């Protein structure tokens, strides 16, 4: 009996879905080419007795609208939940309120032609419902996942526009490429297959990044995600090496630059220039850098200062480590560290002859620190 009732409802109201032993029905009531989101609790399904709105799933506009509809039919007796839905449909008028705000798509009340949802449902089924981890109430935000050969989970997010499929979906993912680097297809199944293909191509890149993140001290990004294709890694003597990778050839020589005490930066830069021909794509990134630079990395979660303090050296000016998403990247030979902005503030406030020489006195030891050329260019 209950199973037959469920099938009848699904036939008559294809945009309603059930959960919780047929007690929670959520989706859309369609009429006159429009679809309106609704959520109902049916504690005595398939009977209509005790049916009420599920306010948790509705915004304020939808609550107000459906409350008024149910009030209109409250005196009419309905034996079954299906009869109640059919009665509700006769009362629905998407033009009842001329307030455009009420009917805006962003407000989640009146939404697009139901053929859009039929298309989205069909395409989700072709991809496999098991690959969908989240689907918004209006079917316009889809989050899908895919596990690579190393069992790492990757996410693909699609924003479906009103004009879909004539208008392409907006795509975001955790792939380690700039957004413009991928030409995405127009339909959900093809987008998902393209995503899976790129995931498999990037497995070696993520292997290399996992090694870096798990072995050495990565200072930026502080919480690396799968789409980050750069790393700032702490070396000895408070030097930070900046690495930018090509995700398709992760063991190739990356783009490299340094920040830190000037004399050490110059030595490392010279080593890269003279020894880069020793780079071997068959070795790991860490091993190659050790060979080329002739130095060791600061290990993850280690203590590298002599007095046992935490390795995250605070800025000598502001006394914090992370400032506006920046870390101290400029260092004095005495060990003092500075955010670029903090050092710049010292530089522009210095009216002494030191500033004219494009240097600033270290607040810690009074040694001169040469400022980046961009500081001087923006000041003089």
Image (cartoon, rainbow, N blue to C red):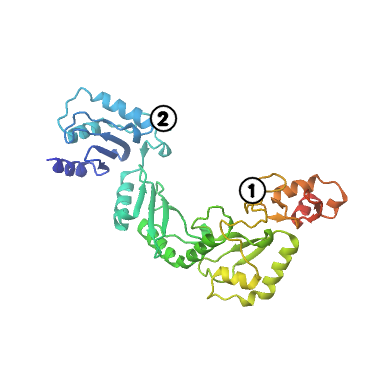
Q: Quadrant of residue 300?
A: bottom right
Q: CA distance from mark 2 to mark 1?
A: 51 Å
* Residue 99 disc label: 2
Q: As drawn, is 45 to the left or to the right of 135? A: left
* Pointer 1 residue: 321
Question: Where is residue 356 shown, x and y percent of the image?
Answer: 85, 52
How crowded pointer 1 is (Cα within 10 Å; few <14, some 14-19, many 20+) is rated as some
Q: Quadrant of residue 138?
A: top left
Q: Is residue 125 above or below residue 1?
A: below
Q: Is residue 288 above or below residue 239?
A: below
How crowded pointer 2 is (Cα within 10 Å; few <14, some 14-19, many 20+) is rated as few
Q: Residue at x 59, y 72 (%)?
A: 288
Q: Residue furthest left?
A: 1
Q: Is residue 244 above or below residue 72?
A: below
Question: Where is residue 215 shown, x and y percent of the image?
Answer: 54, 62
Q: Residue at x 26, y 38 (%)?
A: 25
């Amino acid at each position: 009996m209950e199973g037959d009732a469920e099938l009848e409802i699904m036939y008559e109201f294809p945009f309603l879905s059930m959960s919780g032993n047929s007690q929670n029905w959520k989706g859309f009531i369609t009429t006159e080419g429009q679809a309106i989101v609704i959520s109902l609790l049916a504690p005595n399904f398939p009977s209509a007795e005790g049916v009420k709105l599920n306010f948790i799933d509705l915004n304020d506009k939808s609550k107000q609208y459906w409350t008024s509809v149910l009030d209109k039919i409250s005196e009419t007796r309905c034996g079954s939940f299906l009869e109640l839905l059919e009665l509700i449909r006769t009362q629905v008028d998407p033009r009842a309120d001329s307030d455009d705000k009420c009917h805006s798509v962003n407000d989640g009340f009146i939404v697009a032609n139901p053929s859009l949802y039929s298309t989205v449902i069909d395409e989700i089924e072709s991809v496999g419902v098991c690959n969908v981890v989240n689907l918004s109430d209006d079917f316009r935000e889809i989050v899908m996942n895919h596990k690579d050969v190393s069992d790492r989970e990757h996410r693909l997010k699609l924003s479906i526009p009103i004009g879909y499929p004539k208008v392409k979906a907006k795509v975001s993912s955790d792939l380690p490429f700039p957004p413009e680097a991928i030409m995405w297809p127009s339909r959900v199944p093809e987008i998902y297959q393209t995503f899976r293909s790129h995931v498999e191509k990037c497995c070696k890149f993520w292997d290399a990044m996992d090694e870096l993140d798990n072995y050495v001290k990565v200072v930026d990004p502080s919480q690396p995600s799968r789409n980050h294709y750069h790393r700032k890694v702490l070396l000895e003597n408070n030097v930070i090496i900046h690495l930018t990778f090509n995700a398709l050839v992760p063991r190739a020589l990356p783009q490299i630059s340094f920040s830190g005490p000037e004399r050490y930066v110059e030595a490392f830069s010279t080593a890269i220039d003279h020894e880069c021909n020793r780079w071997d794509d068959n070795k790991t990134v860490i091993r190659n850098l050790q060979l080329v630079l002739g130095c060791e990395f600061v290990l993850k979660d280690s203590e590298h200062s002599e007095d046992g303090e935490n390795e995250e050296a605070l800025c000598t000016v502001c006394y914090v480590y992370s400032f506006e998403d920046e870390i101290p990247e400029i260092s004095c030979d005495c060990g003092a560290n500075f955010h670029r902005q903090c050092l710049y503030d010292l530089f522009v406030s210095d009216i002494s002859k030191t500033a004219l020489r494009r240097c600033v006195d270290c607040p810690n030891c009074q040694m001169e620190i040469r400022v980046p050329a961009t500081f001087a260019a923006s000041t003089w």
